[in-house]
Amino acid sequence: EVQLVESGGGLVQAGGSLRLSCAASGVSFDDFVIAWFRQAPGKEREGVSCRSTSGLSLAYADSVKGRFTLSSDDAKNTVYLQINSLKPEDSDVYYCAAKRSACTGDGRLYTYWGQGTQVTVSS
């Protein structure tokens, strides 16, 4: 059974940082990509970043480039999203998702999803 469990969200002041975690079970990083998405109520889901099967990280959202960094601990089957210089507009539920083969920023193509972790940035 595939499970993705996000953690690390919370309330933070603008300019602060958070590190989100996505603990994956039932998937091999050799076969599955793990991506981060975010979504606020009434807004479209946005692809943020993705870990490829070769361990590369790909960034999708221009608004987060230079501030968000994806990394992984393969021994723990965990993918992280370091978020720096947070802005109020970063307030969203952040999800991790998994699919086989290649990264894409299109969430419709992902098979497995976590429950999400809320990030709230106060101004």
Image (spheres, helix red, strand yellow):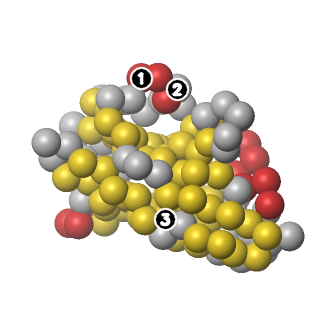
Q: Is residue 29 left or right of residue 105?
A: left
Are there few (<14), some (14-19), or many (20+) residues within 10 Å of tag 3?
Answer: many
**Quadrant position of the N terminus in the picture:** top left
Residue name at image x 37 percent, y 40 percent: 113
**Residue 33, image x, y percentages:** 34, 40
Query: In the image, is residue 11 above or below residue 35?
Result: below
Residue topped by disc 3: 20
Q: Is residue 99 left or right of residue 6?
A: left
Are there few (<14), some (14-19), or many (20+) residues within 10 Å of tag 2?
Answer: few
**Quadrant position of the C terminus in the picture:** bottom right
Q: Earlier in the sequence, mark 3 or mark 2?
A: 3
Residue lying farthest to the right in this orientation? 123
**Residue 36, image x, y percentages:** 49, 47
Residue name at image x 37 percent, y 47 percent: 114
Give the CA distance from mark 1 to mark 2: 6 Å
Residue topped by disc 1: 109
Residue topped by disc 2: 106
Tag 3 and tag 2, C-beta contact below 8 Å? no
Three-letter code, disc 1: Leu
Residue name at image x 48 percent, y 69 percent: 8
